[in-house]
Image: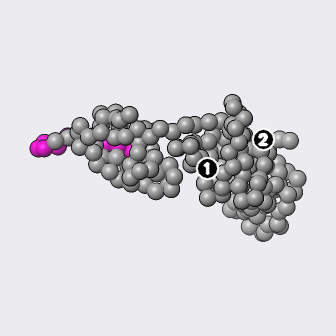
Amino acid sequence: MQYETSAIRKGLKVIENQQPHVVVDFQFVKPGKGNAFTRTRLKSLITGNVLDRTYKTGEKLEKAELDQRKVQYIYPEGENRVFMDMEDYQQYPIGEDVLGDVVNYLTEGLECDLLIWESKPISVDPPNFVVLEVVSCGAGAKSDRATAVTKDAEVSTGHTIQVPLFINEGDSIKIDTRSGEYVERAKK
């Protein structure tokens, strides 16, 4: 299936350079002289690279046939992490090259969104916030209270983040998975 240039909008998924891309920004331009065109900024769903592309009016864009599924993280398997489709129970072993920083937030039973292109998983999106337990934390410098003083804390997944001084071992904390930052202390 193909799209006309008039169908371009943010979030549209298209094929460019034999890879799926999503439109992150676009601008329709109608100059005083010549034909109208649309400037777009495309982000690769595989590599994350951003590409600027201009389409003339009437050009066709190829639709990216993507499948999005709700999956649940179940266990690690060698270099892969195994996710299970919550509808048909199919399992997907996914490598850390696809997961990237998502590995830092995976706990058993965590529900994520899986994006599949040409029968291959291309990205896993965790929820925006996760609650993890602090397993160890260093001592912070207590001398300077005028600024937000932080210390390193290791969470149950093995990832280390910066937390305020009042966080202790055994505390549960809420983390923003988009930025990787501490949000607040979570209730147990």
User: Left of 91 or right of it: where is 41?
Assistant: left
> Neighbour class for label 1 at 10 Å: few (<14), some, many (≥20)?
few
Q: Quadrant of residue 142?
A: bottom right
Q: Confirm or deny contact between disc 1 and disc 2 (CB under 8 A).
A: no
Closest to the observer, 148 or 181: 181
Q: Kindly identify the amino acid type of the residue bearing the numbered disc 1.
A: Arg
User: Left of 50 or right of it: where is 33?
Assistant: left
**Disc number lying in front (1 or 2):** 2
Residue at the limit of the structure toward the left, as seen here: 33
User: Residue 129 colored magenta?
Assistant: no
Quarter in which the N terminus is drawn = top left
What percent of the width, then of the height, locates residue 133? 82, 51
Residue 143 seen in the figure: yes
Q: Secondary structure at mark 2?
A: loop
Residue 7's place in the image compared with 38, above or below, is above
Part of the protein shown in magenta: 23-34
Say which residue label 2 marks: 109
User: Left of 103 or right of it: where is 33?
Assistant: left
User: Left of 93 or right of it: where is 51?
Assistant: left
Say which residue label 1 marks: 178
Closest to the observer, 117 or 8: 117
